[in-house]
Amino acid sequence: LTQIQSVTVEVGEVSTVIPEYLIDCWNWAVKKKSALLQQCQMIVETLPAVTHCDGCGQDYGTVEHGRICPHCGSEKTWLITGNEINIKEISVREE
């Protein structure tokens, strides 16, 4: 392994991580590190926030509708996805 070309990160839509800030911090850190990370790019993919309603069993978009189910009006809901941050892929160059 001689160089890491890119790191792909999945960021949940309601994770409180601001992708532009994450990329700025990444770029700053890359400049400070060894040749292994030089020219390494961070790719951010957004994971949609989805909520499940225990009242009616439906799933819906969290950002569009919040905590109250748009199908039945129940407040018995919980977040399925959208709060996570994951490293999805690391692309490397071997020589």
Image: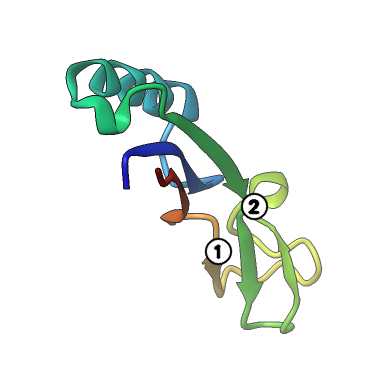
SS class, disc 1: strand
Return the mark for residue 1: none
Residue at mark 1 to residue at mark 2: CA–CA distance: 7 Å
| Residue at position x 28%, y 16% in the image | 28
| Residue at position x 77%, y 72% in the image | 72
Which one is in front, 87 or 30? Answer: 30
| Residue at position x 64%, y 52% in the image | 48
Q: Name the amino acid type tagged 2.
A: Pro
> Dividing the image into 4 quarters, which one contains the C terminus?
top left
Q: Look at the picture and state if 3 lies above or below 92.
A: above
Q: What residue sits right under mark 2 in the picture?
A: 48
SS class, disc 2: loop
Instruction: Determine crowd level at label 1: few under 14, some 14-19, many 20+ residues with C-alpha closer than 10 A.
Output: some
Q: Mark 1–mark 2 contact, CB under 8 Å?
A: yes
The location of residue 6, given as percent across then percent down, is 47, 38
Colour setup of the view: rainbow
Q: What residue sits right under mark 1 in the picture?
A: 81
Q: Look at the picture and state if 85 lies above or below 3.
A: below
Residue reaching furthest to the right: 71
**How many marks on residues?**
2
Which comes sooner in the sequence, label 1 or label 2?
2
Instruction: Determine crowd level at label 2: few under 14, some 14-19, many 20+ residues with C-alpha closer than 10 A.
Output: some
Q: Name the amino acid type tagged 1.
A: Thr
